[in-house]
Amino acid sequence: MENNIPKTDSRRDFLRKLTSGGAVAASGMALYSMTSCKNKSEEKSTLLTTDGKLVEVSDSEIQALEERSVSPAEARQGIPGKKFVMVVDLAKCSNAKKCVEACDKHHNLTPDRPYIKVLKMQDNEKSSPYWMPKKCFQCDNPPCVKVCPVGATYKRTDGIVLIDNERCIGCRFCMAACPYSARVFNWGTPPDEDSDITYSPETSVPSQVGTVGKCDFCPDMLRLNKLPHCVTSCPNGVIYFGDEIDDTVSNGEETVRLSTLLKDRAGYRYLEELGTKPRVYYLAPVDRLFPFENDVDNLDGS
């Protein structure tokens, strides 16, 4: 087997091809294969290339590829053949806020500007209150994109709306246009910000003072065929995420058909009457798994 493994030059050429701009469309699948084949107990891993050749790559190089930031130009192109969608099951939410913690950690956010808020909701005075996680709705008809004067906010082919903070001028027109109040303003730099990180709209780090930020569906994770951090961190399986084209969504524990889930559970979109066409659906808070308990530290749930 060792005789069939290319030497260093071939390995470097293989890595160069993976990280080149022309390989962006296939990078997600390539990185997924690398991740699944990676053996952490070894210093090197043998990988199969797309043309059927074996290459020996060090685990450190694999990790470097996994952590590679996508450039602003690449980030404007959606992941081919995908149309991402999210479903939130309100019957399962207990206000654990693990989704908020994971999102804050991944995007290096301070507590005063979270991308996810868990709101206390009550439909009428006779009904029981419930918890509602709220984030950017990644609208198919996004008002924020229409009002941005510099093209900093844009809609991708895979359904995700992103912000390029290197273009953003901080006018906050998008914040005024968003009917969901899903955006936050970066008033300052987080105390532990790493300035050596290469900026990418797909990670939103390092943050840019005087610009706008929001939930981004974690496209850096999606390129690795992994679920967003809010999905995997939730202990109750509240958030489902997947591809509308494949008609499948998963909460990390179970994978179900999107169309069946929405039909059987009467899925709806928040403030859909505004014509924004959100890509986030909610399932009604019926047959709740947890009794409602107020957050003693933050009664409004924000």
Image (cartoon, grey):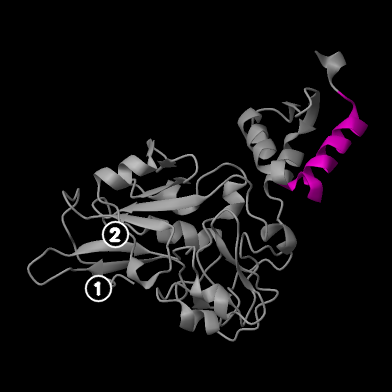
Residue at coordinates 70% horizontally, 55% vertically from top-left? 69
The N terminus - image quarter:
top right
Can residue 31 be spotted in the picture? yes
Q: Which residues are magenta?
A: 6-24
Please identify the quarter of the rendering in which residue 114 is found: bottom left
**Rendered view: 130 above or below 44:** below
Residue 239, image x, y percentages? 37, 50
* Residue at 73% across, 47% down: 24
Q: Residue at x 54, y 84 (%)?
A: 173
Mark 2 Cα-neighbour bin, 10 Å: few <14, some 14–19, many ≥20: many
Image marks 2 and 1: residues in contact by CB distance under 8 Å = no
Question: How many tags in the picture?
Answer: 2
Q: Residue at x 23, y 52 (%)?
A: 91
Q: Residue furthest left?
A: 126
Q: Which residue is more in the foreground, 76 or 30?
A: 76
Which labelled disc corresponds to residue 299?
A: 1
Q: Is residue 20 visible?
A: no
Q: Position of residue 184 (x, y in %)?
A: 49, 76
Of residues 206 and 79, the one nearer the viewer is 79
Specify whether residue 10 is painted magenta. Answer: yes
Residue corresponding to mark 2: 95
List the single residue furthest toward the bottom: 171
Residue type pointed to by label 1: Leu
Q: Give x and y (percent) for residue 214.
A: 51, 69
Left or right: residue 292 versus residue 12 is left
